[in-house]
Amino acid sequence: MSQTDMSQSAVRSHCCHHIKGSTLNDTTASSQLAIGITFLLQTVLGIWGNLSLLYRYLFLYHTQCRLRVTDWICQHLTIANIFVILSKGVPQTITTLRLKYFASDFACKLILYVERVGRSMSIGTTCILSVFQTITISPKNSCWKNIKVKAPKYVAFSISFCWIQCLFVNLIFPMYAYVSKKWRFTNMTNTRDSGYCAAADAENISGSIYAALVVIPEVSFSALILWASSSMILTLYRHSRRVQYIHKASVSPRTPAESKATQSILLLASTFMCFHTLSCIFNILLAIFHKPSWLLVYTTGLINVCFPFISPFLLMSRDSILSSLCFLYMKNSESPNLIRKA
């Protein structure tokens, strides 16, 4: 082969390699843009949905329309959802759309802390909501008959304890883990990349401490949610079988409205467990791989925001009935003192 032919072959090879590289870069850029738009929709709609639901709860509270205990629990779940969306959805949106790189060392630690608090409170409030509803709809002759009357009194304590536990336990992440800008940990092992920040485990956080403070509570809450969901399904099944043979609705131990509320909470708990399980699987994959692909990193972020994004719309479908009853009560009140705070 002549030197001219070799030169032409080299030129063609270089051109083909350049074209393939350009095509691959264009595909990657298009995929990141699509993921960025998805993050943007999740963030905007999720914040709007949670703020709308929170406003509805606060409005009904200040107009002295008595909310159920489950609605009070859902207020705290809504706040936890907002924490997760602000700490996960907003940074991921900015990063994938390449709007601006803003994450300083302090911002990375704050983002990680708020995300962990929101995630912990989300699973905690979902567990409390599921267990409380299971006790509420239990038959009068069940083993929960003594706790059934006292259960509402313990909800406030449980929620307060859950907040205190989440706020203090999750301090181990910004205090004892090396959390900083992504580029600083390029040569370090045991790092977890989130797309905008990176966290490297410090020797101060041993596996036993992490398991005792984070893993064991989450596994325990997940087990309680599964037990409560199974109990609610069994109770609803027995109730439906009994209704088939009892024609008078007043004889039934549960009203249709209560059954519908139970189905809504069951749907919420089931949705949470599906996305929580997927989130755990993808987070484990992120921890296993030293240098995970950008697709794995962003997919994990999308899954982490799915439940906070969906849950307010699931709750709104149930709360629309409650709002209608409250407004009807206010309209039919003969005196403004009826809706004034006691």
Image (cartoon, rainbow, N blue to C red):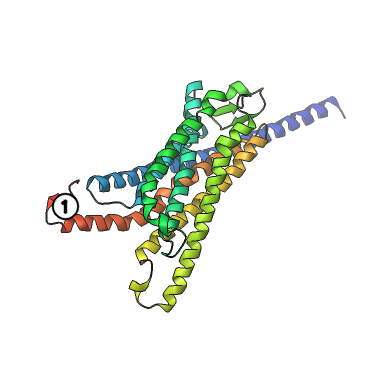
Front residue of 18 and 245: 245
Q: Residue at x 54, y 41 (%)?
A: 217
Residue, x 48% and y 68% (percent of image)? 237
Which residue lies at the image location 61% right of the left edge and 24% below the top edge?
204
Pinpoint residue 163: horizontal percent, then vertical percent. Answer: 43, 37
Task: Examine the rendered structure and indicate whether residue 305 appears above or below residue 264.
Answer: above
Q: Which residue is mark 1?
A: 338
Q: Secondary structure at mark 1?
A: helix
> Above or below — where is 143 with respect to 73?
below
Camera-nearest residue between 159 and 14: 159
Q: Is residue 98 visible?
A: no
Q: Is residue 48 above or below residue 101?
A: below
Task: From the top left corner, tell me how far across and down residue 272 is, in percent.
Answer: 50, 49
Q: Is residue 150 left or right of residue 1?
A: left
* Image quadrant where residue 58 sits: top left
For residue 213, say whether it is visible. Answer: yes
Which residue type carries mark 1? Leu
Q: Is residue 172 left or right of residue 53?
A: right
Crowding near pointer 1: few (<14 within 10 Å), some, many (20+)? some
Q: Position of residue 111 (x, y in %)?
A: 48, 30
Question: Which residue, as the protein is rendered here, is positioned at the far front?
Answer: 146
Quarter holding the N terminus is: top right
Image coordinates for residue 247, horizontal then vertical, percent: 37, 78
The residue sitting at the left extreme is 335
How many badges with numbers are in the image? 1
